[in-house]
Every structure is written in C-alpha cells, then in structure tokens.
Image: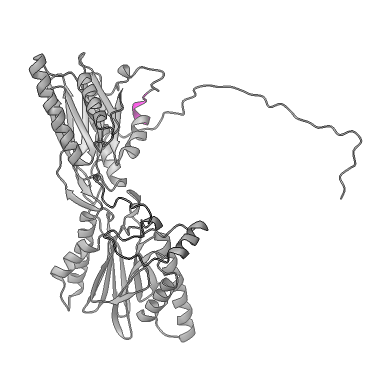
Amino acid sequence: MTKQQANWSPYDNNGGTCVAIAGADYCVIAADTRMSTGYSILTRDYSKIIQLADKSVMASSGFQADVRALQKVLAARHLIYQHQHNKQMSCPAMAQLLSNTLYFKRFFPYYAFNVLGGLDSEGKGCVFTYDAVGSYERVGYSAQGSGATLITPFLDNQLKSPSPLLLPAKDAVTPLSEIEAIDLVKTCFASATERDIYTGDKVEMLVLNASGIRREFMELRKD
Amino acid sequence: MSRFEESAPAKGGFSFDLCKRNEMLVQKGLKPSSYLKTGTTIVGLVFQDGVILGADTRATEGPIVADKNCEKIHYMAPNIYCCGAGTAADTEAVTDMVSSQLKLHRFHTGRESRVVTALTLLKSHLFSYQGHVSAALVLGGVDVTGPHLHTIYPHGSTDTLPFATMGSGSLAAMAIFESKYREGLTRDEGVKLVAEAISSGIFNDLGSGSNVDVCVITKGKREYLRNYMLPNPRTYVSQKGYSFSKKTEVLMTKITPLRELVEVIEGGDAMEE
C-alpha cells in the first residue's frame, strides 16, 4: 500500500500584489484590492493594508485568512506595548515584532507575504520586506505577491538602488519626490495588471508623511 | 495534476489504473499527461440565419498573460470556423491540419465543405491521440444542409447543440446563455448575446480577458469581427513617461590573457588523405 498523500491543504492563495517605496520624508504603501481563489474572483474590493501604529503600515498578500489572524495578533501586541510603555511603537520596533511573530509559527507558517512601511524615529521613510517565516531586511523599496516578479525588475531599474554591499540600507531611500513616487506606483500596478491574472480591479495607496496619512484609490483593469 | 502515486481515489475505493503498465512507462521516462487548465472563454450559438462564434483574446502561461490579443477563432473553410481552447499549439495545429484536409477534399469533390466532415476529421484525430492533444473546440458553420454547431472535447467526444461554451470561462458564459438564449434570434440580438457571454467570461474568469472576437457565418457570407469589443483599455499611462537610460553597471574590469598552447611534432607523418 503506497503512502497516502494529503488530499486537503490548510492553505489557499488569494493572490494580489503589494508594493512599498521609501522616500526621504515619506513612505508609499500600495496593494491591489482583488481577492481571488483558483480562477475565480471572490471580491474586487478587499483591503490588504492595515495601519498597525501611527507610523507603521503593513500590506500583505497570500492567504488572507492567515493575514487577518496575523493582523489581529500584531494589533493586540501593539496595544499591550502602548499600555506598558505609554507610547506608540516605532516602525523598526514593529518590524522586529512582525519578524518574531512570523518565526513563532515556523513549523506551521502564516502564508502571508508582507511589506511593512512607515517613518523611522528620524522621520525618514523606511520599508521592511519579509518572507513567510520572518526573515526581514530594511530596504528602499519592495514588492511582494503574485505581481512581484513583474514589478521588482522595473523598480530596480528606475530607483537605481545600489547593491546593499555598497551602501547601507538606511541610506537607500529614493530621491524621488512624493508625487513622482506615486506616479511610479500607479505605473507599476497598471503594468502588472496587464500581465498578471491575479492583480487588478483597484489599487489602494497609503502615503505616510510628517503631516499624517493619506489614502488614494485608482481603478485598474477588471478582466 | 495526476501522479501515479496518487492513483488511489481520494475517497477510497478501487483504482482502475493499469498500474503495471503505468509503472513501466514511468520507468521509461514518460511523464503522465497533466490536465492543463484551458484559460479561455469560447462560445457559439445558432441564430435564425446561421451561426455566431465568439472568443476572448487572452493567452495565459500559468498566472502570466503571454498574449493580450491572440486569435482564437480559426479558419477551417470559407463557410466553417472553429474556436479553440486548451493548449494553443494543439488548437492551431489541429485546425490548420483539418483546414488543409478540407481544402483537398473540396478539390476532390468539387463541393462546398460540410461541417460534419470537419467534425469527423477532428474527432477521429483527437480520439486517436487519446486526449494527449489538448484541444477543446467549438466548431460552427453553414453548409447545404443548414447551420450547425458542435463542441469537441480533447478525448474525441462531440455534442451537437443550439448554444455552447468551452474553456475555463465556460460556466460564466453559459450562465448568460441559459438565461437569455431563445430560438430564432436575429443577427444583432445574437451578436449582442455572444458579446455579453464572452464579457461575462472576461470579467469573472481570471483565465480569460482582454477583448471580444466575434464571427458571424450565414449562407454564402461570413463576417470575421476581430476585436468587436475592447472593454479593457489600459487604466493609467504616466504623463511624464519613463526612460531606461541606466546602462549595465561595470563592477570590475579584468583582462586575462590566454596562454597559447602549441604542440610541435618533430618529423611526424603528414596527414594522410
């Protein structure tokens, strides 16, 4: 009798793409709003972005049930932090917390591909990129999800990011202005939508800067 | 994706696989035929004067769109067209092949081709390849015996229907047909219904997308309406545009001269002829 293979998987992939770009004094975090399963669309209007602290925003693609659970855990932990320290968590602190939370489930992972964006303690934009089990790195920009392979080469070309070996990640923020960065993000999503079937419908963009948070939507192809 | 180790049915029960033959084939290096998702929506319907075929224009390679505007309605004869879903190479090859066979048959008989001729040629070819030629077709045309519409499955079975859909978007398109189809549609009503069914596939099925192609075949005339509808324009074009001026970064330049290796043979024989 051959070994019985599992015919049920606890995971599903709901698709979608997330992008974040760090600027000198701002951070743009964007994600599409399509949630799908297999070849079907579940909804065209689902937010993959959550604001965890006043200067930290997380976007996650992957299995949205796990993403929701992860968001709840992080929100609860942030509340505890606020009670214990009487202040909001900084973005680098939140980055470490997310990494630890993901690794805690190393042997039954959250099927979530995250980008964390925000402003660090100096007010400079910061972006942290993760894998499913918590390995993370501070970068100048990042893309995750089904359209990441289409977007990342374009961002590499446009943002002229030097190799991490030559320049430390902290200084790898783009010299682009906020308007230019938003234009770049819109172009990225419009292009990824053309070629990736799981990306489309709308893109939700959050911009964090010294004056607060701003949310913008843009329509994408719905096919 | 079928694998030989998983040949025991999921809910238990008996496996009717030819397990010894399958093992022998695997040892010889044969990969089992995987069931490719036919990322397409193709439809056909019969209206009062003939047949209307419709198709989307997206070709996918897994989750990536390989072609945003491909042609899925293939020419078979002046009065017969065929929509194809499945492996693009298979649908192209099989429709081209049968189209050539029909042409030779027309020379041989001196008559207009009949849809049932194309049907028999296609189904016997597909059956003889036992489903390995992954082509799911909607064949439609008008000949001396009247308008005909057929579906052909990769394993070689066929159906004759008043309206039909195939591909991954077939359920979305069939939902439209089942609600709105009736006998004796006019040309404009028929084209509108076909476009609506394909649009349903385009917007609700991720394997289908881009534009709508329509082909109207009536007695003595066919109209191939390529890109009849373009409901998916690009949503954002940057005003300032982007340039790709960055050349490849040169990280290091190093020149390694190759040592010349010359063998000198003293007084050897000249090369024999």
Q: Nearer the viewer, residue B94 or B73?
A: B94
In percent of width and height, residue B228 lies at 26, 61
Q: Tell me if I can see residue B150 in this picture.
A: yes
B6 shown above or below A117: below
B222 shown above or below B201: below
**Image quadrant assignment for residue B219:** bottom left
In percent of width and height, residue A88 lies at 12, 18
Residue A158 lies in magenta, yes or no?
yes
Q: Nearer the viewer, residue B130 or B134?
A: B130
In percent of width and height, residue B60 lies at 34, 53
* Residue ID at (21%, 63%): B171
* Residue ID at (19%, 63%): B196
Image colouring: one colour
Q: Which residues are magenta?
A: A157-161
Residue A124 lies in magenta, yes or no?
no
Q: Is residue A80 left or right of residue B110?
A: left
Q: Is residue A127 left or right of residue A89?
A: right
Q: Return the residue found at the far right.
A: B267
In percent of width and height, residue A69 lies at 16, 36
**Image quadrant assignment for residue B201:** bottom left
Give the position of the N terminus of chain B as an image quadrant: bottom left
Count up the numbered dots. 0
A171 shown above or below A200: above
Q: Tell me if I can see residue B29 in this picture.
A: no
Q: Nearer the viewer, residue A4 or B199?
A: A4
Q: Return the residue found at the far front.
A: A1
Magenta portion: prevailing SS class? helix
